[in-house]
Amino acid sequence: MIEFHGVHKSYRVGDRTVPALRPIDLTVRAGEVFGLIGHSGAGKSTLLRLINRLEEPSGGRIVVDGVDVTALDAAGLRRFRRQVGMIFQHFNLLASKTVADNVAMPLRLAGELPRRAIERRVEELLARVGLADHAGKYPAQLSGGQKQRVGIARALATEPKILLCDEATSALDPQTTVQVLRLLAEINRELGLTVVLITHEMDVIRRVCDRVAVLDKGEVVEQGPVTEVFLHPRHPTTQGFVQEAEHVDPQACQEALARAPGRVVRLTVLGAATYAPLLGTLARETGIDYSILEGRIDRIKDTPYGQVTLALEGGDFEAALARLRAAGAHVEVLR
Amino acid sequence: MDELFRNVDWYEIGLACLDTLLMLGGSLLFTVLLGLPLGVLLFLTGPRQLFENRPLYAVLSLVVNALRSLPFIILLIVMIPLTVLLTGTSLGVAGAIPPLVAGATPFFARLVETALREVDRGIIEAVQAMGATTRQIVLRALLPEALPGIIAAVTVTAITLVSYTAMAGVVGAGGLGDLAIRFGYQRFQTDVMVVTVVLLLVLVQVLQTIGDRLVLRFSRK
């Protein structure tokens, strides 16, 4: 759907060129929610803006649905941009226009629909984002979450195939963030829209994304399904993001681990297995004693998962490992 | 009352008011008509803007700064040949309007440029992302968003023009300021001075109040 082939970007600062993005190869699949995570300055915002060419790449090709976006002329680019909706951290609504006029704007600029049809479409869109009663208000009269809903309705106006989200929830409080993310997931599901979002919060990735790429200093250091990257982070940057999202204090974990008796393993289960009575069965069948050092049961998008660090004592350790693996758990022996 | 304003010829004052208003209205109209596009052009060709063009911006900037640095009284005289060409006369209200416009347009254009720069870049980006042309960005997003700032700029310019009109007496344009200088100052008729100054003060107050009301009316922040 969206393919990056060796795309790179550098800026000229005086007579030096500063690389912002190293050559990047990425593929976003049709209909998925793809997350880009990175610290500020990692280049994620630039990468996102390359897709609709709000930023021009220094080299490489970006192909969307078989069309080389990097080769489009001005008119072609404008047509292409109508197929790509975008929402922003600071909403970027026009303060001088009402909610309805903001949402109608992309349609009026395109100039393809008659007035009546635009009005109907705006009504539909506002109903979808739950703002039907606010059509005549001005953005300044809305809360942050409502403003972002207007942003989403506006981005959907031209029935785009792709929705780009630029830190769409970073300016919102946690509760509103969850609501906006739920709306995005709903839109992705119901409209089959491909969503690319950037964020610096792993929690956002965990809640809505199917796949994720981790950007660090202009490079993709890790990518894959969120279940994989989130539960088995390999790169230090990714590990940092996951620990932050899980509120894990690495030092406290190390200490707990050092004090624990016997062997220490990390157990990861995904899907229905998460709710199976795994540990009780294990203790009964292999005579092993376990204590939970640290862990959590949660969801990654729609997939339940459990990840616990266990200290195992007594009984047959090898048999216990085999039993866990047979039950579909991923086991890492830490000590 | 009559004793107090012994030297005041109220008919003369009335004519002067009319002249001032005519000069103000005429010159403000042309200043806005010329200054608004110039301000937009300054903005668009400025550093890191949509049509960034260093040489053009440098030239426009230079012309604007040159006109702004020229004392209005000099401009008034230097422009006489051009004024005659444009209006057929260098005298009276008609003769005063071209130099007034020439003096106020660069000032107004700079204010417009500043008002446009106040518009959040994110808004331009959002409208670009919708597939807007540059023309649409300017007409449908930038100008509406900057409208309160532009109205404030018109207000400030109008008030500046009021003080410029006082000097237009040099070319026989008349007006309140001219009356104040010729009678109030040069002939020591303090009463004429007081009346004209009070009238000018009232005019400025009215302009500022109207401007402020309009800014408030169009501000949605």
Image: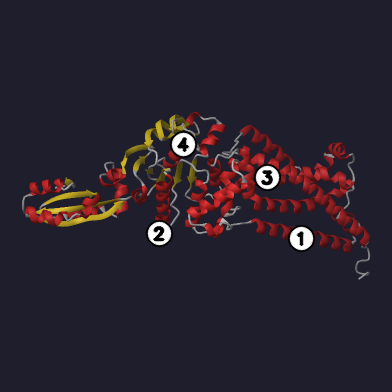
Q: Residue at x 66, y 58 (%)?
A: B217
Of the residues tagged 4 and 3, which is closer to the observer?
4
On the same chain, marks 2 and 1? The answer is no
- From the viewer's side, name the closer residue of A26 and A218: A26
Residue type of the residue flagged with mark 4: Leu
Q: Are marks 4 and 2 in contact (CB under 8 Å)?
A: no
Label 1 crowd bin: few (<14), some (14–19), many (20+), radius 10 Å? few
Determine whether B49 is above or below A316 in the image: above
CA separation in Å, label 1 and label 4: 51 Å
Where disc 1 sits, the SS reads helix
According to the picture, the residue beneath numbered tag 1 turns out to be B206
Residue B142, position as x, y percentages in the image: 62, 46
Residue indicated by mark 3: B110
Farthest-out residue, bottom: B1
Q: Which residue is mark 2?
A: A175
Q: Are marks 1 and 4 on the same chain?
A: no
Closer to the camera in the image, A194 or A288? A194
* Label 3 residue SS: helix
Residue A260 in the image: state x and y as whole percent: 14, 55
Taking the spot 14% from the left edge, 54% from the top edge, the residue there is A311
